[in-house]
Image: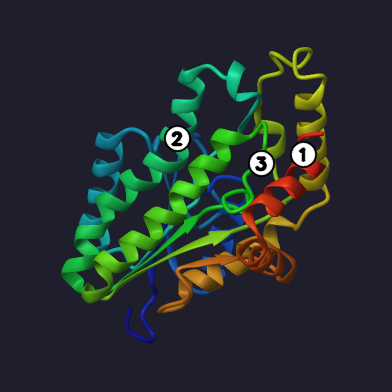
């Protein structure tokens, strides 16, 4: 990543929402940007789109190899692809739970694995994994989403130590509520709401209200792009002052108290 040389960046899930904003910000910084998403159309004009499902290891490997053949290396990887499901654990089909982990966690791991070897050999690279404040603050009725993001945090911490001697740095960023199509795309399972006294519907409605009033995706994209351009940073970091304060409080307060407070917000 020499000064004056355009960085080669790869963003997953870059066709909409936060990912699209990250792509635009990286383009504005003079980067060459590649983007993976399942959609036929990609991110902003100027982004080089690949129609790739991050859970398809063969497709991911082939696409990464094409990029490496074209430009020789990848400087920055932003793993953003993901989606959310909601519902009670008791009534969530395991197929849906596995799909949540496959996309959000194993999809991230698949793309990282495909890129990592070339970064290590060059002794240069930056990996940014998009987690969520829902990792340290586990959200009831969105249990598997919180689990997938908590797994990203631990993965990022462990990987950072594995690759530090080879000039590769890793960071997990934790956005909070963001106004994107993620809210409408959430796969909601209302089954069991009667048995749970309407608490599933109330919880999801409250979360969606918070998301619709949340940070603009453009602002989140600028923050993530800024983190991606750094040589190093905290291994896990929240985006925005209020969420940084929240994460500090979560660390300082007793777990029982934090969980009780989260329950008051999202499990009444």
Q: Residue at x 38, y 72 (%)?
A: 7
Residue depth check, mark 1 versus mark 2: number of the one nearer the observer: 1
The image's colouring method is rainbow
Q: Is residue 19 above or below residue 209?
A: below
Residue 239 in view here? yes
Q: Which residue is mark 2?
A: 101
Sequence-first tag of 1 and 3: 3
Query: Is residue 56 positioned above or below 234 on the image?
Result: above
- Tell me the crowding category of disc 3: few under 14, some 14 to 19, or many 20 or more residues within 10 angstroms, Cα based: many
Q: Earlier in the sequence, mark 1 or mark 2?
A: 2
Locate residue 247, reporting x and y percent: 64, 63
Q: Earlier in the sequence, mark 3 or mark 2?
A: 2
* Residue 139: mark in rendering: 3
> Quick check: marks 1 and 3 in contact, CB under 8 Å?
yes
Q: Which residue is mark 1?
A: 266
Q: Residues within 10 Å of mark 1 (few under 14, many from 20)?
A: many
Task: Please give left or right for residue 93 compared with residue 107 in the image.
Answer: right
Q: Is residue 48 visible?
A: no
């Amino acid at each position: 990543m020499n000064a004056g040389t355009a960085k080669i960046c790869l963003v997953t899930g870059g066709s909409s929402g936060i990912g699209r904003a990250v792509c635009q910000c990286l383009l504005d910084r003079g980067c060459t940007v590649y983007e993976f998403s399942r959609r036929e159309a990609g991110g902003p004009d100027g982004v080089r789109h690949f129609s790739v499902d991050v859970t398809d290891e063969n497709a991911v490997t082939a696409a990464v190899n094409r990029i490496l053949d074209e430009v020789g290396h990848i400087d920055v990887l932003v793993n953003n692809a993901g989606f959310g499901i909601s519902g009670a654990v008791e009534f969530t089909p395991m197929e849906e739970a596995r799909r949540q982990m496959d996309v959000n966690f194993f999809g991230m791991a698949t793309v990282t694995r495909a890129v990592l070897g070339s970064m290590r050999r060059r002794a240069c690279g930056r990996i940014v994994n998009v987690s969520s404040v829902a990792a340290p603050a586990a959200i009831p009725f969105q249990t598997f989403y919180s689990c997938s993001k908590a797994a990203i945090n631990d993965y990022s911490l462990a990987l950072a130590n594995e690759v530090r001697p080879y000039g590769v740095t890793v960071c997990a960023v934790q956005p909070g509520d963001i106004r994107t199509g993620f809210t409408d795309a959430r796969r909601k399972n209302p089954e069991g709401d009667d048995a749970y006294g309407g608490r599933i519907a109330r919880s999801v409605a409250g979360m969606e209200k918070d998301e619709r009033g949340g940070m603009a995706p453009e602002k989140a994209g600028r923050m993530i792009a800024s983190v991606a351009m750094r040589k190093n940073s905290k291994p896990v970091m929240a985006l925005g002052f209020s969420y940084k304060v929240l994460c500090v409080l979560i660390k300082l307060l007793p777990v029982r108290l934090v969980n009780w407070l989260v329950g008051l917000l999202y499990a009444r």
